[in-house]
Amino acid sequence: MSGPVGFRWFRHAGGVNPCLPPTVSGRYLSFADRENIALLRARGAGVREIARQIGRDPSTISRELLRNASTRTYNLDYKASVAQWHAERRARRPKVAKLATNERLRDYVQQRLSGEVRGPDGSTILGPSVPKWNGKGKPHRADRRWVQGWSPQQIANRLKADFPDDESMRISHEAIYQALYVQSRGALKRELVACLRTGRALRVPRARSKQKAWAHVTPDVLISERPAEVEDRAVPGHWEGDLLIGLERSAIGTLVERTTRFTMLIHLPREEGYRHKHTVKNGPALAGYGAITMKNALAAKITTLPEQLRRSLTWDRGKEMSAHAQFQIETGVPVFFADPNSPWQRGTNENTNGLLRQYFPKGTDLSRWSAEELEAVARTLNNRPRETLGWKTPAEALNEQIESIEQAGVATID
């Protein structure tokens, strides 16, 4: 077969091998058994001799030689690979996908995958206009459609919470993936794969990003100096932060609370005079995330929280936090910096930034989005259930923390 034909078959199978597993029940012949049958048959052994040597009934061997032999030769030659192919072909049991028969379940899944992004007042936030999905791969450094974007695992587990007594509203996340990627399943539209986090047309491994270290970090603000209570996530109020960088030096600030995974986005518009011909040489940074601009925007955002929910901030080594000492004086929030090339030390924030790239892809201008639009995206993210929170949403988890703080304050006053 030609390469394009093989690749088309591969795409129709969803990028996974549809063959039987290498180990099967002892009731059936395995590929190793068929190899032994082929070797013994080539040596001229009879049916009963083959059955005795591999420990099977003679009728099993006789039936195997008749049913799974090669049919394109003058004599019925037995080849292990051909016999295995015949066995796999017969083992397939065509079955209608659950999403194809259960319209209510299908609508639930599609809504969580491709539902609209809405603001706090319930209005629809359209996001960017995007071209029609061509089915060849994910958009590279281009705008993507803004949708609810729940992962199949989130959908599968949230069904148990939303429909605890309805067993018909159950499906595994793998069944959702197959409905999206395997063309023969046909329950969900193929273009809905663009609503997944990666947006890839096939299921392939993800790449890892790299970080750079900068010299403005002093020993007293290293992550090793961070309080020990931050590690176990038992005490809320410890945040991780970073920037999403876009085209033309545009950026969005991200803050994620370690305990609840609650996310806040910081609007960083470019300063007046950016790229103007009269820009002052060696003057302040006008790109929107200079040290002073970043410090002011971050302080304005984090001070909207109760004092008990702003205990510390862990950042990477970007130069945008060069004014961290002044930030700590103004807000009372100590800042710590991760080690060079150690993104796992800020894993919560790195994971969240990966989720946000669904709405703000690399290579796009991030300065065009208003503060209201960023708030809508953050609200959408905070209303997705998380496995690590017992399938609660970050907003629900944060509300519980705020209520416990308020109750503790009332008890102290009494």
Image (tube, rainbow, N blue to C red):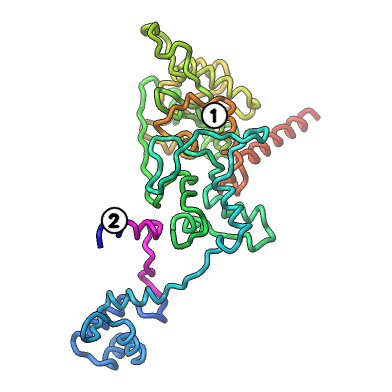
Q: Which residues are magenta?
A: 8-24
Residue 259 visible from this viewpoint: no
Percent from the top left, x then y, of residue 263?
A: 56, 34
**Eyeballing the image, is 33 above or below 391?**
below
The image's mark for residue 265 is 1
**Eyeballing the image, is 230 above or below 271?**
below
Element at badge 2? helix
Q: Which is more N-terminal, label 2 or label 1?
A: 2
Closer to the camera, 206 or 413? 206
Percent from the top left, x then y, of residue 86?
A: 34, 77
Closer to the camera, 180 or 175? 180
Task: Look at 50% across and 22% down and name the residue there.
Answer: 268
In the drawing, does residue 166 fall left or right of residue 283?
A: right
Closer to the camera, 230 or 356? 356
Q: Quadrant of residue 33?
A: bottom left
Magenta stretch secondary structure, dominant = loop
In the drawing, does residue 274 fall left or right of residue 297?
A: left
Based on the picture, tell me whether residue 10 belongs to the magenta stretch. Answer: yes
Amino acid type shown at disc 1: Leu
Percent from the top left, x then y, of residue 280?
A: 39, 6
> Which one is closest to the eye, mark 1 or mark 2?
2
Q: Which residue is mark 2?
A: 4
